Image: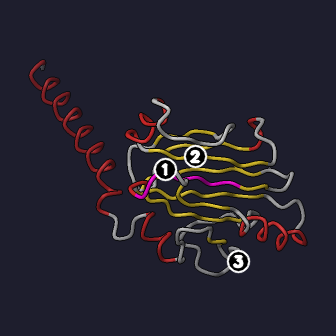
Amino acid sequence: MIRTLLWLLAGAVLGGIIHIAVILSLPALSATSAWDQVAAVGAGPGPTVLPAATPNAPNPLRLDPELTYAVCRIDLRLGPASVGGTLPQAFWSVAVYSRAGTVVYSTTNRDGVGTALDLGIFNPAQTRLLAEQKLDVAEGLLIVEAREDDLFVVVRLAPPHPEMRARYEKALGNLKCGTIAT
């Protein structure tokens, strides 16, 4: 009886380990990564305003049709990066993603940031230079450290009315994203 229970327990533990291993390996086995999907929409170094998601149309990035989106691809090998601009008073959020699509950093204007977005993105070596005051950055820059060099930043705006969508997309297109001049 005890031997049977031990075998059942061992089988359950082994099944759990296999289950977790499969779940954790699925993103690496995906045919298209988040990076590939962002590259497919043409996101380059500057801000790329994504077209609105429409009903009955393909939506590979799973965009919310009520929001407007801009994407910037960042390469920290070229130096520290920044994303900045003035956004409308309505709700907005910004998220920094790794190449695999995991969130490195995220915030909203509800965190007391207001309408100004001023985000600096650094890898660990650049953060060390910043701490040693060997890099000169603007005061008030929100510092984000990322372990990877290939990143993409997504800025989302929530227009209160559909008629304001074009104005919000224009605000997203006016964002500045790229390497910080050091």
> Residue lying farthest top?
2
Residue under the point 60% across and 60% down: 177
Vertical position of residue 52 compared to residue 102: above or below: below
Colour setup of the view: secondary structure
Between the residue at mark 3 and the residue at mark 1, the CA separation in whole angstroms equals 36 Å
Q: Which residues are magenta?
A: 78-84
Look at mark 2 in the image and give the residue it sits on.
120
Left or right of 138 on screen, residue 144:
left
Labelled pair 3, 1 in contact (Cβ < 8 Å):
no
Q: Earlier in the sequence, mark 3 or mark 1?
A: 3
Vertical position of residue 82 compared to residue 52: above or below: above
Classify the position of the N terminus by image quarter: top left
Residue 118 highlighted magenta (yes or no):
no
**Residue 2 occupies which quadrant of the picture?**
top left
Look at mark 3 in the image and give the residue it sits on.
54
- Circle 1: residue type: Pro
Relative image position of residue 173 (x, y in whole percent): 71, 69
